[in-house]
Image: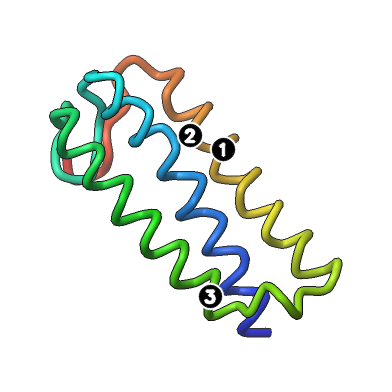
Amino acid sequence: MVQLIFAFLAAMFLFNAIPHLVQGICGIKHMTPFSVLSSPAVNVIWAWLNLLAGGWLLKLSQPGSWTARTWGLFCAGGFIISIYLAIFWTNPDARLPWH
């Protein structure tokens, strides 16, 4: 059960890193938990924190022993965060609750 949760959360962190890394590398300001418009450097740092957290959870989930169910939950985590972010970013006034 823990392996399934770690796989799901690993995907969420890893897929969340993608937009922050891309925006940061492209020199574009983008929202992070720290600010509505964080600098590109902050986005790269936030992306790397997500990559490290996702990688750590991935390692804890022992991907060498994954079953089809574990792979399904990993894919579901990536899909869910991707759809959520796609919907979230369609709102021009998107804000995190603490912004």
Color theme of the render: rainbow
Left or right position of 86 against 48: right
Left or right position of 66 against 79: right
The answer to whether mark 3 and mark 2 are in CB contact below 8 A is no
- Between the C-alphas of marks 3 and 2, the distance is 25 Å
Q: In what quadrant of the picture does the N terminus appear?
A: bottom right
> Which label's residue is closer to the chain start, 3 or 1?
3
- Element under label 3? helix
The residue that mark 1 highlights is 82
Residue at 82% in and 68% down: 69
Q: Position of residue 31 (x, y in %)?
A: 25, 32
Q: In which quadrant of the rendered view does residue 61 lie?
A: bottom right
Q: Which mark is residue 68?
A: none
Label 3 or label 2, whichever lies nearer to me, is 3
Q: Is residue 90 above or below residue 45?
A: above
The answer to whether mark 1 and mark 2 are in CB contact below 8 A is yes
Q: Is residue 5 above or below residue 40?
A: below
Q: Which mark is residue 59?
A: 3
The answer to whether mark 3 and mark 1 are in CB contact below 8 A is no
- Element under label 2? helix
Left or right position of 3 against 51: right
The residue that mark 2 highlights is 85
Which one is in front, 41 or 2?
A: 41
- Between the C-alphas of marks 3 and 1, the distance is 22 Å
Q: Position of residue 6 (x, y in %)?
A: 56, 73
Residue at 49% in and 51% down: 14
Give amino acid for label 3. Answer: Lys
> Which label's residue is closer to the chain start, 3 or 2?
3
Q: Position of residue 58 (x, y in %)?
A: 55, 69
